[in-house]
Amino acid sequence: MNNLFKYEFMKIAKKRMNIVVVLVSLFLTLLFFIMPVKNYIALERDGSQVNGTAAIRLEKEYAKELEGTLTEERVAKDIKAYQALFSNPENVVKDGDQVNLKDDIYARSVLPHFAYFKMIDEAFVKPQVTDNGLTALRDMRLNKDTAGFYQARADKVKSYLDMDYSDWKYSEQEKQFWNTHNSQVETPYEYGYHAGWKSLFQCFELLIVSIIAICICVAPVFAGEYQSGADSVILSTRYGKSKLIQAKISAAFLFALLVFSVNLVLAVGIQLYAFGTGGWNLPLQILNVTVPYNLSMLEAAVVCVSILYLVLLGMVAVTLLLSAKMKTAFVVLVIDVLIILLPVFLGLSGTNGILNHILMLLPYMAVQPVFPADYTSYFSYPLPGLTLSIITVRIVLYVVICSVCLPFVGRVFKRHQVQ
């Protein structure tokens, strides 16, 4: 068995086309994950722009000024400081009914901490409303020394769940499910530098390219034997219908895991080396204030990586089953690409919630972290007496896909009619 496994593994690994595909995937991973570092932008307090690693260093300095616990008193104090900027007539410029800060004041006092102010502002604006002008903070009337930040967040979550959407309406069961999740979110939040983790969550989905590359490499595992005519020889040998099939499957999975792991280490390594690991223990809520998951940045990243691996294993299992069934690797690849990229072609519907719930489980969408947006972080699947989060459903689905497909791979290949 060991010799068969080594032979099948080396057959995949040494194939010239596979070597080219793997190298291209590594190059694309390098390119995709280094670009956010090179293109990272920050502004000095005088308004001058810096890029790349210099911008990251500057962002760390700005974030250090904001480190600490977001108590109600601190949030109120920071809101008052922001509002005080508008109290000085020399700081503002009027445009009709609009009152805005002058560019130099905005660049010096707001831009360095914009993400922080925006995070606080998000708790006070209505669901699905974008307030890049921070008008909610500017116009807020504070109650003594507290801002009611966490109550505002709770009210916003309730409003979000109660809204009547054109594609989906949350049932009472779902509302209870998400309210329970939100009750487990620890407060007050800790705030600090977290740019590396934010960038990772924005880039994880790009690893779908590596998964496609791996599918290209394993597609000929069985179909290639049909094309070359070797299937008649294989199936007539002593172990052709048993150990050889197991060796092919095991070799394909090991190859997939090794190639993907190299891509993943390269991707994560580039980002965390450039940005640093600072903020690994901070709560997800400082990325998106209404996220219902009680996870740190590191824990959320582990969830994302776990789902990436499960999607990979699921797609390898599907590819092997198709390879055992189809006559050519090309047909296998066409079906693979359609499965992976179908959400790109269709897009999420504004009126069909059931379709959206299906599309969100397909590989292209499944590798995307759900945490950055309310729409995805509150995605749930209600069953009679049970509600599952999208994270749980993705995990269960790809485990099931892998478990269901694998037993049929060998059966399909063994029952193949030799031409």
Image (tube, rainbow, N blue to C red):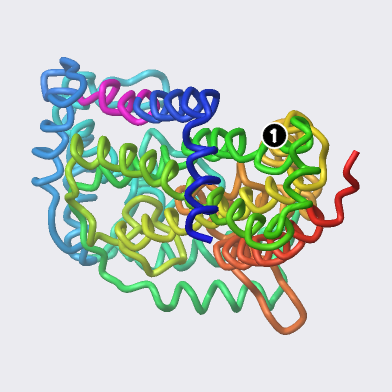
- Residue 204, compared with residue 329, is above or below; it is below
Q: How many marks?
A: 1
Q: Main secondary structure of the magenta part?
A: helix
Which of the two residues, 315 or 70, is positioned nearer the viewer here? 315
- The residue to which callout 1 is attached is 337
Helix, strand or loop status at disc 1: helix
What amino acid is at disc 1? Answer: Val
Residue at x 53% of width, y 61% of height: 1
Q: Quadrant of residue 36?
A: top left
On the rendered structure, is 319 left or right of 326? left
On the rendered structure, is 102 left or right of 253? left
Residue at far bottom of view = 385
Which of the two residues, 51 or 365, is positioned nearer the viewer here? 365
Residue at x 51% of width, y 45% of height: 7
Which stretch did the figure color magenta? 31-42
In the rendered image, residue 399, in percent from the top left (x then y), is placed at 61, 65
In the rendered image, residue 104, in percent from the top left (x then y), is placed at 17, 19
